[in-house]
Image (cartoon, helix red, strand yellow):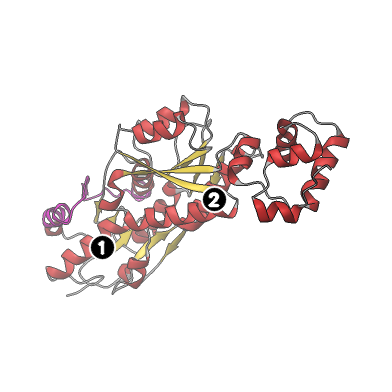
Amino acid sequence: MEEVRTGAEYDQSHAMTIADIAEELGVSKSTVSRVISGKGRISDETRNRVLSWIRSHNYIPNSSARALASNRTYNAAVVIPRDAGKGDKPFFQECLTGLAETFTERGYDTVVSIVDGSDVSSLERLVRHRKVDGVVLTRLLKNDASLAFLQGESLPFVVLGTIQDDTVYQVDSDQSAGCYDLTRLILDSGADRLVLLAGCRDYEVNRLRYEGIVQACEGSNVTLLSELWDLQTVQDVSVALEQCMPQKPDCIICMDDVICLKALSWLKKNGYSVPGSVRVVSCYDSEALKTHVPPVTALSVSAWDLCSTAGNALLDIIEERPVEQKQQVGFQVKIRESSRVIREK
């Protein structure tokens, strides 16, 4: 007598597979695979027969079968620079969380790739061993090695930032416009003796922020008193402030929140009040600046919005849905106590 196994019996003995379905219906495994993936030529009669069996037995393809059927891994990579923990750790934590949650909601797992300047070997392994379906680059350097590598591959990728290449999918806020507005706020309040404390010149985001600051200054015929770059450590910021504070600046513009917090700490230790002795603003906002005493005026961009937009853009490209080449997330200048006009006698 021919043995007939029901869906319940399948559940009791082992998880159903594509092979089980093929055997039950008398078709090939590749036919079942094509029906599940929605790709390939299958007659309507066969497709409906397979789909009807799947529905009646509550079959859910496991991840391996799903990947084989669609020729995907259902993994997406997030590329993070090795030095992320030295300064921008809060941003990259938000970034990774936002991307991972976005990927999870759409059935993908997250793989993290750490790159170190020109050493992108970890990313190369992921791509060339077909471990991921796409990549999000989180911070670019000038002449970025990760970007150059991916441009030579066929794998979809999205840049979290702005670059001068219209063929690359990219998601960012308008950093130049935001820093222009932030600087104009300070200039319009009467300050004309400005100092810039900045990080690495090679980061594209810093280049764009600097562009906006300079444009605002030029519009008011103001020249920065000092530009102090490549500030990484507490010692770097301390030395920079020791150099520039004798110039009696009206306002210190910090390129990011990490530099800003180091500057605020030094000012407090050395007897300067904010905003009484000098005003302080930041080109990137964070929870630490919002809760600082005094709260710090800053350019605010939602890291969650950036990452959600970038993550969804990448998955849409992978799944062959239409995607805008460049997408922008809005910004706000959050005016707080640190930029209030006070002058101590």
Residue kind at label 1, given as amino acid type? Leu
Which one is in front, 206 or 49?
49
Residue kind at label 2, given as amino acid type? Phe
Query: Which residue is tagged 1?
Result: 261
Q: Quadrant of residue 265?
A: bottom left
Look at 35% across and 55% down and name the residue there. Answer: 283
As for residue 250 lying within the magenta part, the answer is no
Please name which of the two marks, 2 or 1, marks the residue nearer to the observer.
2
Q: Quadrant of the N terminus?
A: top right
Stretch of the chain drawn in magenta: 216-244
Q: Quadrant of the C terminus?
A: bottom left
Q: Quadrant of residue 137?
A: top left
SS label for mark 1: helix
Q: Is 140 rendered above or below residue 274? A: above
Are circles 2 and 1 on residues that touch, CB within 8 Å? no
Which one is in front, 234 or 149?
149
Residue 208 in percent (x, y) is at 38, 43
Q: Earlier in the sequence, mark 2 or mark 1?
A: 2
Residue 226 in percent (x, y) is at 20, 49
**Label 1 neighbourhood size at 10 Å, few (<14), some (14-19), many (20+)?**
some
- Number of callouts: 2
Residue 124 in percent (x, y) is at 40, 31
Q: Is residue 158 visible?
A: no
Q: CA distance from mark 2 to mark 1?
A: 32 Å
Q: Residue furthest front?
A: 1
As for residue 232 lying within the magenta part, the answer is yes
Query: Which residue is tagged 2?
Result: 103
Specify the label residue 44 is tagged with. none
Is 6 on the left-hand or right-hand side of 115? right
Look at 32% across and 53% down and name the residue there. Answer: 88
Look at 55% across and 39% down and name the residue there. Answer: 73
